[in-house]
Image (cartoon, rainbow, N blue to C red):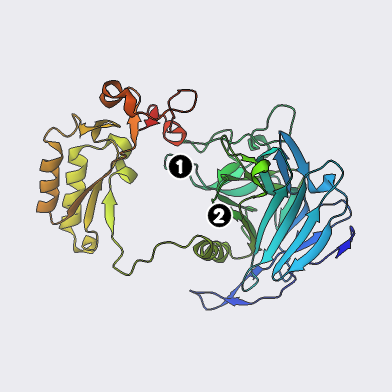
Amino acid sequence: MRKRRGAIAVLAVAVGCSSGGGGGSIDLAPPMFILNAAGTFDVDFPGFDGARLRGVDPRFRVDGVWHAASDYPPPTESRVGDRFEWDFSGPGLPEWTYRVRVAPGGAWADVDLEVRAPAGVVDGFEPIATNEAWVRGLGDEVYFLHDGYNIFSFSGVVRVTAADRARRAPGTDDVVLAGNNFDVFTEQLAQGWWWGSIAAPQGEATILAGALTTDLWKTAVVGEPSVPARAGLRVVQGTNGDRWDLARGPVASERVFLGAGGDYAALYQRYGEALAVSKPGLAWTGEAPRLWSSWHQSFDRVTAEDVLRNADALAADPVYDPIRYVQLDDGWMEAWGDWTANEKFPDGMAALADQVRARGRIPGIWVAPTLVDSDSRLAADHPEWLLRDAAGSLVECVTCSLGAIGRQVFT
């Protein structure tokens, strides 16, 4: 064990990986964390000179107060297997540990932190927090791959200028998270959910950060210009309702993927592979079902004619033979909770299903059985079925309501 501010090189692992598709070399490099004299971390990517992070100051919030690495005396540094740890403590301060694990193959790092204290409520983490991220070619704009909040949200690459920085709480540098629904051109252009990446317009280098776990905290990622030719990169965890009472024991942030490289597609492939290990899905050995869904074309404005027109198109061309299902999504019912056909489907669901089958396809339908519109007939007829909190208020589905399609509550 040793306590000092000097440089400790972490994850200095050279790695060469062959691509799955092109057969050439994937330009990825493992992060190397260095504790600097300011008590923050510098992150380099040995073997790749196109990206770096400076002044990474991980932090967490207890009882409304943020505690950052730079607030503490020099930590104790140690290595446990493939994981490097820094243990922070100080008079009157919560104890915590910053952990960085080298991934199998060494092409990325798995980062998290754990807080220990006899009392207090934790409601936020920032495992990665810096205003000095750099990628080759960076100027006054950051190209940020923004992941939308829900199915109503925009997802894709956005150009972020200084005017587009994520919204802050008054008088602070604390990011105010938002859903950022429907329209890409919102005040939260620089903030997405679960994962995100930053690059310069030339796209020669990318830094990617994303959640590997979703056990307790919701994760957002911010990518925005900061000082000249530098970007802010922050992984923010904890939204309304996310909290942990330390009287119950220690609590950890969600684990975060951090990687960089010149091949953004390979970098995202690595992230996907890491997610598959961290959150393994159910095994499926059969043929992958393929379908046409009304949602992606007609949203909730779908009509019976829309469904049949697309079913006809599928039946008319052999190229669509692998698409076996025609799925009717939201927009067919009178209201959430009133699961009967509305005026756009005058013949009802059974008749529509028969017509889909006649075209050689299998009909499917979307329902949300645990959600109801607060002004539906079901809510009026059976208020005792609606879920309420300890104060007697209806428990609202915030994600649904942010879609601006009414107020949905839980049954």
Which quadrant: the C terminus? top left
- Foreground mark, 1 or 2, reads 2
Say above or below: 407 vs 163.
above
The one nearer the camera, 153 or 275, is 275
| Left-right relation of 178 to 6 | left
Q: Quadrant of residue 125?
A: top right
At a point 44% along the width and 30% down the height, the residue shown is 396
Q: Which one is in front, 272 or 58?
A: 58
Q: Position of residue 303 (x, y in %)?
A: 21, 37
Query: Mark 1 vs mark 2: which is more N-terminal?
Result: 1
Q: Name the residue under label 2.
A: 213
109 sits to left or right of 403: right
Quarter of the figure that contains the N terminus: bottom right
Residue type at tag 2: Thr
Provide the residue designation for mark 1: 150
- SS class, disc 2: loop
* Residue at 62% from the left image edge and 42% from the top image edge: 160
Q: Position of residue 113 (x, y in %)?
A: 69, 53
Where residue 252 sits in the image (x, y, percent)?
Answer: 65, 51
Percent across and percent down for residue 263 are 59, 65
Q: Considering only vertical position in the picture, is 12 above or below 295?
A: below
